């Protein structure tokens, strides 16, 4: 029909993650108490819980928004720790290998590959941090293999520094209690749902209750209780004008 609004199909992509080191694979799967060793919350569990938080935040649950802000802070902290560790190992491999010695990067002869699905943008950031950790472990093992660092320094970098950054990130949403049952409209009306949520989960900062402070990666809000299709796996279903997808003219000036 002439003049009809053009439509395009939903965007879809297949994303796989490849890991080359055992510490990174352990961080992905985690470890249960049945192993007889200390429990490790894996990134798979993190992504599930982060998805639940994302969905609750889309339903206008202010407590979920509070959790998203906490996850964003924890993600930034872990990212900074891994960046510092990356600089240290890069410095060792760059400055301590003599000229004329060509050392190629190590790769696993049988890497672990798995498809990845997350419940929101904050989950994708965690996936990329795990892959950064995997790369750091590879380089630390290489540095130890060619005698640039000893066993204690190797273990400290892998387990105590990089490993701690990933483990603390994965554990961050472990105590998320689920959807509070109350929305910002309930809090504005101070009804029974809001009073029950306050009694169970405590008070929230006013700017979070009002929605003026949300995570940069918080989903769009739906007051009808549904989760926006655009806040998960791409731009499908997104209600965006063309000028929202393109930079403004003043942003493209030299």
Image (cartoon, rainbow, N blue to C red):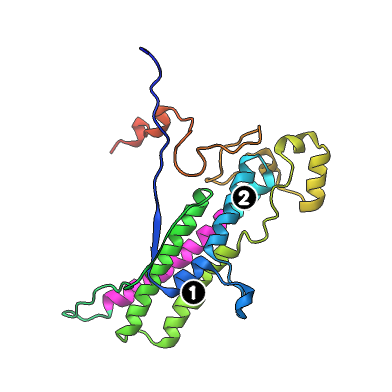
Q: Residues within 10 Å of mark 2 (few under 14, many from 20)?
A: many
Which label is found at residue 53?
Answer: 2
Q: Which residues are magenta?
A: 72-95
Magenta-drawn stretch, dominant element (helix, strand or loop):
helix
- State the count of labels: 2
Judging depth in this view, the residue of 6 and 66 nearest the camera is: 6
Q: Given the current orientation, which residue lies at the most extreme top position?
A: 2
Residue 96 occupies quadrant = bottom left
Q: Residues within 10 Å of mark 1 (few under 14, many from 20)?
A: some
Judging depth in this view, the residue of 215 and 128 nearest the camera is: 128
Tag 2 near tag 1, CB within 8 Å:
no
Point 76% across, 36% down: residue: 186
Point 55% across, 54% down: residue: 72
Q: Say left or right for 47 vs 242.
A: right
Tag 2 secondary structure: helix
Q: Which residue is mark 1?
A: 161
Residue 146 occupies quadrant = bottom left
Q: Say left or right for 55 vs 178.
A: left
Tag 1 secondary structure: helix
Tag in front: 2 or 1 = 2
Q: Is 1 located above or below residue 31 in the figure?
A: above
The verdict on residue 73 being magenta is: yes
Point 49% across, 77% down: residue: 159
Judging depth in this view, the residue of 157 and 131 nearest the camera is: 131
Q: Given the current orientation, which residue lies at the most extreme left position?
A: 100
Q: Residue 100 in the image: state x and y as whole percent.
A: 16, 80
The verdict on residue 103 being magenta is: no
Q: Is 16 located above or below residue 192 in the figure?
A: below
């Amino acid at each position: 029909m002439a003049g009809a609004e053009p439509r395009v199909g939903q965007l879809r992509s297949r994303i796989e993650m490849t890991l080359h080191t055992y510490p990174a694979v352990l961080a992905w799967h985690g470890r249960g108490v049945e192993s007889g060793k200390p429990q490790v919350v894996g990134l798979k569990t993190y992504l599930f819980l982060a998805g639940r938080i994302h969905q609750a935040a889309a339903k206008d649950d202010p407590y979920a928004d509070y959790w998203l802000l906490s996850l964003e802070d924890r993600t930034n902290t872990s990212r900074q720790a891994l960046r510092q560790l990356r600089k240290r190992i890069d410095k060792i491999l760059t400055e301590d290998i003599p000229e004329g010695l060509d050392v190629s990067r190590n790769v696993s002869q049988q890497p672990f590959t798995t498809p990845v699905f997350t419940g929101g943008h904050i989950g994708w950031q965690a996936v990329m941090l795990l892959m950064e950790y995997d790369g750091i472990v590879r380089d630390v093992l290489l540095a130890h293999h060619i005698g640039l660092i000893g066993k204690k320094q190797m273990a400290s970098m892998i387990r105590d520094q990089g490993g701690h950054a990933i483990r603390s990130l994965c554990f961050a949403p472990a105590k998320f209690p689920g959807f509070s049952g109350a929305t910002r409209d309930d809090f504005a009306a101070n009804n029974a749902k809001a009073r029950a949520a306050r009694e169970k989960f405590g008070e929230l900062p006013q700017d979070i209750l009002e929605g003026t402070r949300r995570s940069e990666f918080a989903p769009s809000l739906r007051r009808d209780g549904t989760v926006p299709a655009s806040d998960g796996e791409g731009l499908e279903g997104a209600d965006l004008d063309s000028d929202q997808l393109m930079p403004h003219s003043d942003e493209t000036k030299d």
